Image (cartoon, grey):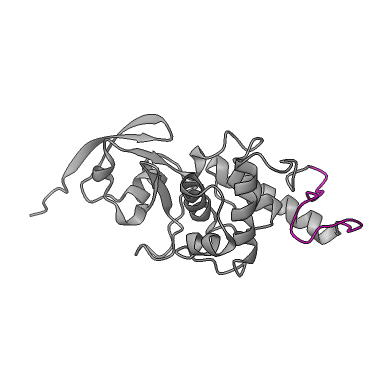
């Protein structure tokens, strides 16, 4: 005799929008976000809470959504990467910083970094380099070597405090910002840097709109 799996009707507040879904009692928050709500910007990597790719903001705090039962999220405010930044044309300070500093390559880990850093800067708006490194130490990246991600933390802090121009690597002509790492008087933007800036802007655009990058 097969026993039907128990289901529960949940009311979840995600990115400021109320959703009602009926899901199995054991459904994880990461799966509800991706499969039931279509918010695929939240990526699932290790499924053990180690890699950080599935990080969302849970009442403002960064939380691994693969370790949270969806039922426990009722009554709480969930913010995914889609809820950070108004739209692809108006990225958040953290998203813009990743573009400015070329802080991503394949982009799989990027949503978790963005939500983690967004929460961190609310707590520490003027971090030192050591504090920036500590803030991202719980998220894994197999591509970048973390150097530009750490730079992106500092850059995002500058933007959040209102320092420095926002017209950065997302420029359609691919020009890099004047204050990008390594830039100085007389420096030139190479074709490789222009291409990297365009690629980064494209990835952040996909992440911010909840689309998977194919």
The residue shown at (75%, 54%) is 180
In the displayed structure image, the side of residue 123 where residue 192 appears, left or right: right
Q: Nearer the viewer, residue 35 or 82?
A: 82
Tell me where residue 136 appears, x and y as whole percent: 50, 61
Q: Quadrant of residue 21?
A: top left
Q: Nearer the viewer, residue 175 or 150?
A: 150
User: Quarter holding the C terminus?
Assistant: bottom right
The residue shown at (64%, 35%) is 90
Would you place residue 191 above or below residue 143 in this image? above
Tell me where residue 45 appears, x and y as whole percent: 44, 62
Taking the magenta stretch, the answer to whether it contains residue 212 is no
The residue shown at (66%, 35%) is 89
Q: Nearer the viewer, residue 62 or 18?
A: 62
Q: Which residues are magenta?
A: 172-188
Would you place residue 98 above or below residue 37 in this image? below
Is residue 214 something one can see in this rendering? no
Q: How many marks?
A: 0
User: Quarter holding the N terminus?
Assistant: bottom left
Q: Quadrant of residue 167?
A: top right
Is residue 160 something one can see in this rendering? yes
Tell me where residue 145 appears, x and y as whole percent: 61, 70
Q: Which residue extends farthest right?
A: 186
């Amino acid at each position: 005799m097969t026993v039907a799996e128990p289901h529960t009707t949940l009311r979840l507040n995600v990115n400021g929008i109320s959703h009602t879904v009926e899901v199995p009692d054991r459904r994880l928050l990461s799966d509800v976000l991706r499969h039931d709500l279509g918010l695929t910007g939240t990526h699932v990597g290790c499924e053990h809470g180690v890699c950080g790719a599935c990080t969302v903001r849970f009442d403002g705090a960064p939380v691994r959504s693969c370790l949270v039962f969806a039922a426990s999220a009722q009554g709480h405010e969930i913010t995914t990467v889609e809820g950070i930044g108004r739209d692809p044309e108006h990225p958040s300070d953290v998203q813009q910083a990743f573009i400015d500093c070329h802080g991503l390559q394949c982009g799989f880990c990027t949503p978790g970094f963005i939500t983690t850093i967004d929460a961190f800067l609310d707590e520490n708006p003027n971090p030192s380099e050591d504090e920036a490194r500590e803030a991202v130490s719980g998220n894994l990246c197999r591509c970048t070597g973390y150097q530009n991600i750490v730079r992106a933390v500092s850059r995002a802090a500058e933007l959040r405090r209102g320092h420095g121009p926002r017209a950065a690597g997302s420029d359609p002509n691919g020009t890099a910002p004047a204050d990008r790492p390594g830039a100085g008087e007389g420096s030139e933007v190479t074709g490789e840097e222009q291409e990297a800036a365009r690629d980064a802007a494209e990835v952040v655009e996909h992440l911010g709109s909840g689309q998977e990058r194919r």
